[in-house]
Each structure stands twice: as structure tokens, then as C-alpha cells.
């Protein structure tokens, strides 16, 4: 059973870069597509993007210019960087995993709230 | 960009059948997935590939597809089924519907 745990700052200043890391346990980093998904308070889910262990990525077109997802296979971790943040980027950020690209999200982390505020 | 449309809310009495729809132009060609999200919790996959049920999901949850609309059906709704439900599909990227709040009266 794959388990995912997000970590990173809970508060980020406007115009700065949001950085989060997801630590994977109970499964091989080479067996899944690793995603980031966010949910603004009281709103719906928004897919940010995914990465495969090989390094291939796919990003939400609406966020693509500001997003970088990377993977560190040696640490069983993958990471999210979102640049030039504004208050609209305030959300619960989930790391997640699926067996195949563009299909079901089978495993989810518990989520971490990131607030963008000065 | 590709969009999935869900009704904002559905209400049913306990024991009745709840149907939540999700519409999108690519649904005839792409599978749909359904997630249940309770307050303060991460989403849980309840239906995959339009109508398949993951292990551990009660049999009262079922899915179907017809043309550009997919439907999540919950038969014999229980109080514990009160939650937000999201459909998901993809074309070149993953897309979520706006979510439907299921209220059990």
C-alpha cells in the first residue's frame, strides 16, 4: 500500500516560490505516475501535473508557465515548485499517485495547507 | 480547454437512490473516474474506468456511461455517504469536474 506524505512551508509570501516535497513509502518510485493536485478552501480539485520516474512530465496548461515537478529516486521523493504565487494559489496541496498516466488517482497524501500572504 | 460539468448539489433521503451526473465532450472516448471526499479528508476513488469498483468500495456504488454523460449511482444511500463527489477524466491532461455535494436528508 503506497503511502504519501507532503512537507513544506505552510506560509509563502506573494511573488515568491512555493516548494513542497512528497515522501513515498510502501511502493517503488518507478511504478507510478506521481501527481500534485490542489484544492482552494471551499472549492474543487485542480490537477497541477504529474511526473514519471524517468523524468517525463505533464502539466496543467493553465499553470504550466509557473510549475516544475521533479523526482529524486534515491530519496523516494518528488517535489513541486510553483513560482510567482498570489493569494489565488492558497490551497490544500495533495501529492498523489496513479498506476497509469491520465487515469485514476489511486493513492493520495493527507494534504497540506499552503497560505500565500505577506 | 476540456471541461467536465457536474450539478452543484444533489439531495436524497436515506435508503433512496442518488444519481450524480458528469458531462464532457471527450467522455465518449475517455474513461471517467469518481472520487468521494468527506470534510477534512483526501479524496477516495470509488469508481474507475466508468463502472469498475475498487476493492473495499461498497456495492451500492456503481457507475455508468452514455454518450457525453457519465453517472455515479449510489443505491440505498446511507448517512455516511454524505460527501462531495468529483468526476475526473482526461484528454491531454487530467481534468476534474467542479464537484457535487451530496446531502442525505
Image (cartoon, helix red, strand yellow):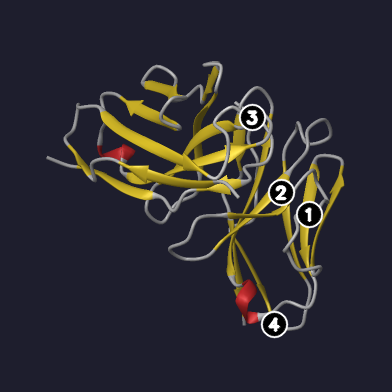
Place residue B53 in its image quadrant. Answer: bottom right
Describe residue A103's horizontal placement relative to residue A84 as left or right. right
Residue at 75%, 47% (x, y): give it: B48
Location of residue A28 in the rendering, given as x and y in whole percent from the top left corner: 57, 34
Chain identity of mark 2: B
Provide residue A19's location: percent of width, then percent of height.
29, 31
Q: Residue A47: where, in percent of width, then height? A: 52, 36
Report, in whole angstroms, how far the alpha carbon at label 3 lies from the one at label 1: 18 Å
Q: Secondary structure at mark 2?
A: strand
Q: Residues within 10 Å of mark 4 (few under 14, many from 20)?
A: some
Q: Residue extending furthest right?
A: B66
Mark 4 touching mark 1, by CB under 8 A?
no
Q: Which residue is mark 4?
A: B13
Residue B22, labelled with which disc?
Answer: 2
Horizontal arrangement in the rendering, residue B29 relative to residue A35 (left or right): right
Q: Is residue A66 above or below residue B39?
A: above
Image quadrant assignment for residue B25: top right
User: Dot 1 corresponds to which residue?
Assistant: B71
Amino acid at each position: 500500500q503506497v503511502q504519501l506524505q507532503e512537507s513544506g512551508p505552510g506560509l509563502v509570501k506573494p511573488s515568491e516560490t512555493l516548494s513542497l516535497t512528497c515522501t513515498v513509502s510502501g511502493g517503488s518510485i518507478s511504478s507510478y505516475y506521481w501527481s500534485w493536485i490542489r484544492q482552494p478552501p471551499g472549492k474543487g480539485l485542480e490537477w497541477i501535473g504529474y511526473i514519471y520516474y524517468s523524468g517525463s512530465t505533464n502539466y496543467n496548461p493553465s499553470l504550466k508557465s509557473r510549475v516544475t515537478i521533479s523526482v529524486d529516486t534515491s530519496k523516494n521523493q518528488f517535489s513541486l515548485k510553483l513560482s510567482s504565487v498570489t493569494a489565488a494559489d492558497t490551497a490544500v496541496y495533495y501529492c498523489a499517485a496513479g498506476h497509469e498516466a491520465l487515469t485514476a488517482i489511486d493513492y493520495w497524501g493527507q494534504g497540506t495547507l499552503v497560505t500565500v500572504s505577506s | 480547454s476540456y471541461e467536465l460539468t457536474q450539478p452543484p448539489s444533489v439531495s436524497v433521503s436515506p435508503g433512496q437512490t442518488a444519481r450524480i451526473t458528469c458531462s464532457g465532450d471527450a467522455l465518449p472516448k475517455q474513461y471517467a473516474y469518481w472520487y468521494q471526499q468527506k470534510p477534512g479528508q483526501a479524496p477516495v476513488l470509488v469508481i474507475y474506468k466508468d463502472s469498475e469498483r475498487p476493492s473495499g468500495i461498497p456495492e451500492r456504488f456503481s457507475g455508468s456511461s452514455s454518450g457525453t454523460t457519465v453517472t455515479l449511482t449510489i443505491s440505498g444511500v446511507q448517512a455516511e455517504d454524505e460527501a462531495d463527489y468529483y468526476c475526473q477524466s482526461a484528454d491531454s491532461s487530467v481534468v476534474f469536474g467542479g464537484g457535487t455535494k451530496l446531502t442525505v436528508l
